Amino acid sequence: MSRKKTIVKKNNLSPLAWGLAFGIVFGFLLQKGGVTKYDVILGQLLLTDFTVLKIMLSAVVTGMLGIYLMKSLGWVELQPKSGSVGMNVIGGLIFGVGFAVLGYCPGTIAGAIGNGFLDALVGGVIGIWIGAGLFAAIYPKLRNGILTKGDFGDVTLPRLLKVNDWFVVIPAATLISLVLYWLERAGL
């Protein structure tokens, strides 16, 4: 009589550990860049201080090149989520209202809390809870309505153009780098 082996698969915490590590590094860099300060964020919203834009564009270029390099090496598999115009509009409005009212986005709230800023702790955490709760409450009504308007699926620009990823990534990274160079030269 043969015995069957039971294989117990342990949860792979490695992706979570990497996510936590990169999140801590990202938060540290946000703090060092000064974008966890209310005045810097307010300056971005008033178009007088472009520190936030420069840091975020730098992060986009770094992340884009890193992700597509890892994809090319076979280290990661990209599985983009489907999207729609409705999702982007609703998400943008919720994000924008919270950003304008409090002066922080979710990433900078975490960094500001790490700096000990009470407004981020109280207003940010409460705002995130209220916003998430309200969205969860109305999501069933939105799910089959406005959130599906203008559905564009899980398309990416390279897939849409039917080209190799790098034919989009390199020009996009170059364009963003030129914008960063121009912002720096203009003293913005």
Image: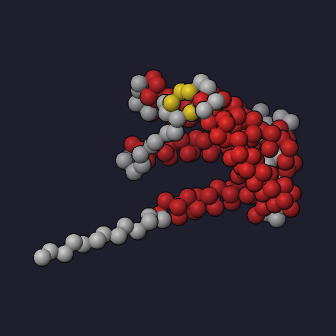
The quadrant of the image that shows the N terminus is bottom left
Report x, y in % for residue 150. Answer: 59, 24
Q: Nearer the viewer, residue 146 or 96?
A: 146
Q: Which of 1 and 158 is in front in this view?
A: 1
Task: Identify whether 81 is placed above or below 161.
Answer: below
- The tally of labels here is 0
Residue ID at (36%, 47%) = 74
Q: Would you say 164 lies left or right of 40 here? A: left
Q: Which of 47 and 179 is in front in this view?
A: 47
- Res. 83 in view: yes
Q: Nearer the viewer, residue 96 or 117?
A: 96
- Res. 54 in view: no
Report x, y in % for residue 129. Answer: 75, 54
Residue ID at (37%, 67%) = 9
Q: Would you say 18 lies left or right of 146 here? A: left
Task: Identify whether 121 is placed above or below 47.
Answer: below
Q: Picture quarter containing residue 60?
A: top right
